[in-house]
Image (tube, rainbow, N blue to C red):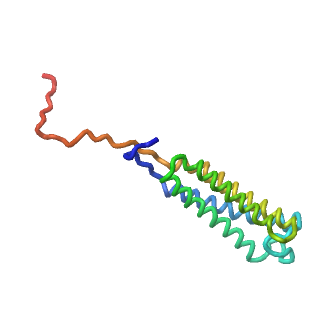
């Protein structure tokens, strides 16, 4: 527990540099997931198979949205780091629940079962990667500075006597 004079400082530069790398990973997971779905198992994800393995602009959109989600997650993490005790615990719970929502939503759509499961699995991979990466490096960006000890104002009238 910290008192009011303890300062928690987040190295925002390092946190957001890690966020950029995490966003890249999330986008690449989306692309790899779509390539596997369309190219190896011949399952529709986002766009019909007829668009080819690379699909259309929806593949890019999925990757960009995945990257944006990683950046939004970093914003949430940054807020929690400066305001909440045990921020990574709360962040992990929030992200796991949001990831479960992202997995369950496609399963409830009235489309082919294989497409629903594949999309849910891609969302699961993205959510777990973003959560795992951010929670692994975030504590290294936080510095807890102890309270400054303040003895009192300097009094020039006090003589300092050395041994004589």
User: Which residue appears at 83% of the width and 71% of the height?
Assistant: 110
User: Measured along the vertical axis of the image, is residue 151 above or below residue 39?
Assistant: above
User: Which residue appears at 66% of the width and 57% of the height?
Assistant: 130
Q: Exactly how many numbered labels are in the figure?
A: 0
* x then y, percent, for residue 44: 84, 70
Report the residue that reaches farthest toward the top.
Answer: 164
Quarter of the image for residue 66 reads bottom right
User: Measured along the vertical axis of the image, is residue 68 above or below residue 96?
Assistant: below
Q: State the residue in front, 19 or 131.
A: 131
Q: State the residue in front, 77 or 51.
A: 77
Report the residue that reaches farthest toward the left.
Answer: 157
* x then y, percent, for residue 41: 88, 64
* x then y, percent, for residue 101: 71, 61
Q: State the residue in front, 69 or 20.
A: 69
Q: State the residue in front, 31 or 154.
A: 154
| Left or right: 15 as drawn, with respect to 27 | left
* x then y, percent, for residue 38: 84, 68
| Left or right: 10 as drawn, with respect to 150 | right
Q: Quadrant of the C terminus?
A: top left
User: Which residue appears at 73% of the width and 64% of the height?
Assistant: 30
């Amino acid at each position: 527990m910290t008192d009011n004079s303890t300062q928690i400082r987040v190295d925002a530069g390092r946190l957001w540099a890690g966020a950029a790398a995490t966003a890249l990973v999330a986008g690449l997971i989306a692309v790899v997931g779509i390539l596997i779905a369309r190219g190896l198992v011949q399952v529709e994800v986002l766009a019909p198979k007829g668009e080819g393995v690379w699909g259309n602009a929806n593949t890019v959109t999925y990757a960009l949205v995945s990257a944006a989600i990683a950046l939004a997650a970093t914003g949430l993490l940054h807020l929690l780091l400066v305001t909440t005790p045990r921020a990574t615990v709360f962040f992990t719970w929030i992200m796991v629940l949001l990831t479960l929502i992202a997995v369950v939503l496609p399963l409830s759509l009235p489309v082919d079962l294989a497409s629903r499961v594949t999309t849910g699995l891609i969302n699961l991979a993205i959510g777990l990667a973003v959560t795992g990466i951010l929670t692994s490096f975030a504590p290294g960006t936080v510095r807890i500075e102890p309270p400054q000890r303040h003895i009192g104002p300097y009094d020039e009238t006090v003589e300092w006597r050395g041994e004589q």
